[in-house]
Amino acid sequence: MRKTLGFVAAALTVVLGLGGRAVAAEKPRLVIGAVYVGSVNDYGYNRSFHDALAQVARDLPGVKVLEAENVPESAEAERVMEGMIRQGATLLFPTSFGHQEPAFNVAKRHPKVFFEHAGGWMRGPNFGVYFGSTQTAWYPMGVAAGKMTRTKKLGFVIGMPIGFALGNVNAFQMGARSVNPEATTIVVVTGGWSDKAKEAAAANALLDQGVDVVAMHVDSPATIIQTVEARGGMSIGFQSVEANVLAPKGWITGLGFTWAPFFEDVAKDVMAGQFAPGATYRGLGKMVAVAPFGSSVPEDVRREVTAAVDKVKDGFNPFTGPVTDNEGKVQIPAGQSWGGDKMGNFSWYVEGVVGRVK
Amino acid sequence: MTTPLLVGILAGAILSGTSLLYAALGETIGERAGIVNLGLEGILLIGASVGFAVTAATGSAWWGLPAAAAAGAASNLLFGWLVVARRANQLASGLAMMFLGFGVSALVGARWVGAVIVGLPKWRPPLLGTLPWVKSSTLFHYDVLTWLALPVALLLWWVLFRTRWGLRVRAVGESPTATYAAGIDPSALQYQALAAGGALGGVAGAHLSLSLTLTWAEYMTAGRGFIAIALVIFSKWDPLRAVAGALLFGGAEALQLQLQARGVEISPFLLEMSPYVLTLVVLLAWGGSRRLAAPASLGRTFQGVQ
């Protein structure tokens, strides 16, 4: 029966003129499985992985990509990944933090299948971790905000006050202050990564305070960007470089993830049989990209932001002491600096941030 | 440029309170007819996702809004069939309906995540826009649902307490047996009440997706359905008191965000709890007198008469 179906499928392939693809359809050299916690149409986090894998499939012949959306962070994720392995996947990308443990369990059962998990901490002989270092990348975003603001009040909506999010806020404020010494950043915490109604209310509360540029660290920036746009404010996006369509007037720029180069390296190594999972953290220009500027951003601002982007790419680290928190305490003493390994350790806001962590 | 705290809280309370009020009004009608639907959260979600999907597909929120109301009514009628015709336990069925709502809304909404929609148009009377602070806040810049929230509450109060239909609905909620003896079919009235209540629940969800956030995301109601159920108790099953309650609960949510935006030195974790603490306080305060207000047969299954 299966043979008959295979024959029919092959015949159809030829009849439909897809013969050129039949080579790839014969047997892919590598099957990649990707697991997403949400939908790939979120203008955010999940979309960034989907776009990257689409590019991998375009760039590397013989690579087939299997994707599963809305996979819960539970044993259900294990079932989905087992299914992908049955379909021939030998490289899996579980992308949500909560997929870490299910993926690790599956990895233990399949030592010959490789796993690269986004943003976790577990490691194994076939289990690696990677993430974009966004913190320093927020510095040029702060430069953009500092140049564009008229009220000198910037807003930042974050889901939860975790170290990585605080690092984003801190670099943003430092970048803003580097071009606008009076700029302050007001932080509002919504208490969840995807509480849309609260995100709208948070953006409104910031605009009520005279904030005119709003940045965010939540799962999908769509609600905040649209709320700000409707009230004539400006926004700086996060998680995807495509969110500019949501704000034709007020969009300044934003940060997104570009995983494709890393994914391609991994895929090539797996195909060559020489893959060794590790911990890979890459910043601006590698895993983190700057979104296109909005039409309202003048030329001199674009130049200054681009210069700041280049500065960070060349190794500039804003978290170089002395860095003082917003209660006046020196957190990073002179002569020291915080590298990529410490980005989750922030438990304080830098000078000029209006907000409280605990 | 900055808006005074009270103006900000009031403006936020009205925006957050709109969906809470519609949801609470919907639940009030059902509970007045003796049926408690703990699955209100699911109805809100179905309204939000169906409203968003239809708006994205047709390009107009004027199709999405009635679709959300119809979907809410249909869900509540399904619940009605369970608890009225099949005489299932209301609390258990309600919770099952909630989980059904999670699933159905996710299924309907999945295709439309990330769709860009034109939401319900907002309008501010030109004269009010000239008032101080109004221009720089969201005050009086509302969509049709927010403008109609108070009139709908008034209308519902009038229907429940001043019309024959309302009297019958309340009679069913107090004593279905007595209503039956009076020659009225309790189940027909309960279905009518649930359809109307479900439609309001669907509208409540649609306000979240079609006006407040302009997005659909799974479980975007984030517990508002449950706050609305608490609100019904707070308001003692009275649509007019529900208006005050919705403002109070909406205000609690707005307060924490407004205080943060003002840089007030209060723990964000503490502030996040405030709507729920308020819920508990209200339930405690009202606890003693609850018997006087709740429909006597609320939650009981009418088994018919011998």
Image (cartoon, grey):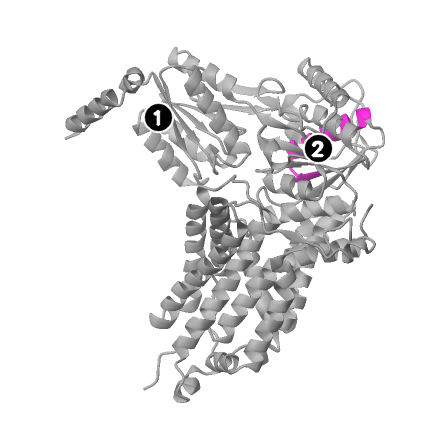
Q: What residue type is labelled 2?
A: Val
- Where A164 falls versus B123 (above or below)? above
- Where A194 falls versus A131 (above or below)? below
Q: Residues within 10 Å of mark 1 (few under 14, many from 20)?
A: some
* Location of mark 2 (residue): A169
Say which chain tag 2 marks: A
Q: Say which quarter of the image contains residue B237.
A: bottom right
Q: In which quarter of the image is the C terminus of chain A?
A: top right
Residue B246, x across and y down, in percent: 64, 63
Determine whether label 2 and label 1 are within 8 Å by CB. Answer: no
Residue A110's tag is: 1
Q: Are marks 2 and 1 on the same chain?
A: yes
- The front one of B119 and A218 is B119
Q: Residue sitting at 44 percent across and 15 percent down?
A: A59
Residue A98 in the figure: left or right of residue A209: left
- Where A280 falls versus B54 (above or below)? above
Q: Which amino acid does label 1 sit on?
A: His
Q: Residues within 10 Å of mark 2 (few under 14, many from 20)?
A: many
The span shown in magenta is A156-179
Residue A156, x across and y down, in percent: 70, 38
